[in-house]
Image (spheres, rainbow, N blue to C red):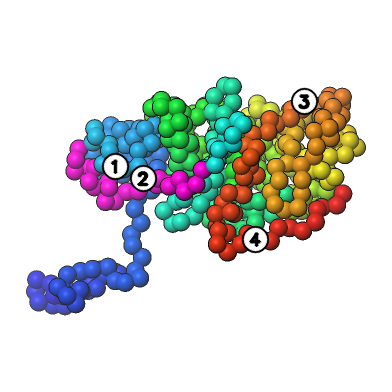
Amino acid sequence: MKNNKGVAAALPAHFVLSPIDGRLVLEEGARRVPKLDMKSMSLAEIEAALAGLGQPPFRARQVFRWLHRRAVCDFGEMTDLPADLRARLRAEADPACAAVVRRQEAPKDGTVKLLLRFGDGETVEAVLLRYRFGHTVCISTQAGCRMGCVFCASTVGGLARNLTAGEMVEEVLAANRELRLRTGDPEARVSRVVLMGIGEPLENYEAVVAFLRLIHDPAGLAMSYRHVTLSTCGLVPEIRRLAGEGLPITLAVSLHAPNDELRDRLMPVNRRYPLRELLPACAEYGERTGRRVTFEYALIEGVNDAPELARELARLLKGMLGHVNLIPLNPSGRGLGGSPPERVEAFRAALERAGIAVTVRRELGTGIDAACGQLRRRSESSGRGLPAAVAGRVQE
């Protein structure tokens, strides 16, 4: 290749001359320039990107609404944009939509679990839950998890990668599309979001906070922060950091044990952030946000469901701005079973007698792979056998 003076010119990085017609082509194996992840961008960021293309500010709001409110997956469908801009966005931006590769529906309550696949092949789960007040979507924040909780299917296989803010938004939009398909209402949408799916949200801190701000934006989903719940296994520095973000979301802390000895065995993260560090961070979150902290307690038969443990839990939480949410454990294929109804009721009653606010989570999703991560594991293991289940149970 020569320049206009006949002197050999350097080729652009990753390009070679075609031996067929002499044109520039991308060399085999070269990394292609990634498309713009527009769904992860704030309205201001989209405005700045479009300004670089000579577009006026109002175009950013149009694009943002198409992506977030109307949930389109093709820039060509954005009919109020100029044709040349639509073509440019198609070529240079990514709507970051996921394919629904599998869905399961519980026959009793209508819970729908979606297995979503992103462009790189990674899969996550999103669950559409129906309540009297409307619909809630439970989303994943990571593909896989490395927290190692012994009762959780999500952690088998470890962490593949973090999700982007846009991919988390896409989980909400996938639930909205599913809801619209089922109801025939083109405006149907979920009213609440819970970050309780695959992954530890606070390990993917920056993307999760960006996601929360995106779904709150009035130009898009306009989700109230008070309709969002984030569940964490207890990453203390990030809980304190979240308390200062000005996001009045509900914090749910996966507790599952009233003492360090038992929690160490159930949740390895406790060895890093024991209860003496975790509970003050939870108290700080409640004080700074004015939001009551939810303490999640999955009842595992013969492990953490004894009445004396309920009394110990009551002593641990006495005086805190919070309440306990008891969760009958969904079987996860890891050798642990949920407590029977009579033990759940005995545990609840012991907490109530001790003056602790307590609820029992309604069981949804019976008849499908209800435990978080099961559908993803089943899909990834198809044709080569499931990973070996953890043998035995954790002894008290």
Residue 107 visible in rendering: yes
Q: Which mark is residue 357?
A: 3
Where residue 95 appears, x then y in whole percent? Answer: 36, 45
Q: Residue placed at 54% from the left, 28% from the top?
A: 135
Above or below, 282 relative to 354: below
Q: State the separation of the CA atoms marked 1 and 2.
A: 7 Å
- Near mark 4 (Cα within 10 A), the count class, few <14, some 14-19 or many ≥20, is few
Looking at the picture, tell me which residue is in the foreground, 224 or 274: 224
Q: Residue placed at 85% from the left, 52% from the top?
A: 395
Can you identify the residue that label 1 sits on?
A: 75
Q: State the separation of the CA atoms marked 4 and 3.
A: 39 Å
Looking at the picture, tell me which residue is in the foreground, 285 or 325: 325
Q: Is residue 100 magenta?
A: yes
Name the image quarter holding residue 41: top left
Q: Amino acid at mark 4?
A: Pro
Q: Is residue 182 magenta?
A: no
SS of the residue at dot 3?
Answer: loop
Q: Residue placed at 65% from the left, 61% from the top?
A: 387
Choose the circle earlier in sequence order: 4 or 1: 1
Q: Amino acid at mark 2?
A: Pro
Q: State the separation of the CA atoms marked 1 and 3.
A: 49 Å
Can you identify the residue that label 4 sits on?
A: 387
Q: Which residues are magenta?
A: 82-103
Where residue 61 appears, x then y in whole percent? Answer: 32, 32
User: Decide: marks 4, 3 in contact (CB < 8 A)?
Assistant: no
Q: State the separation of the CA atoms marked 4 and 1.
A: 40 Å
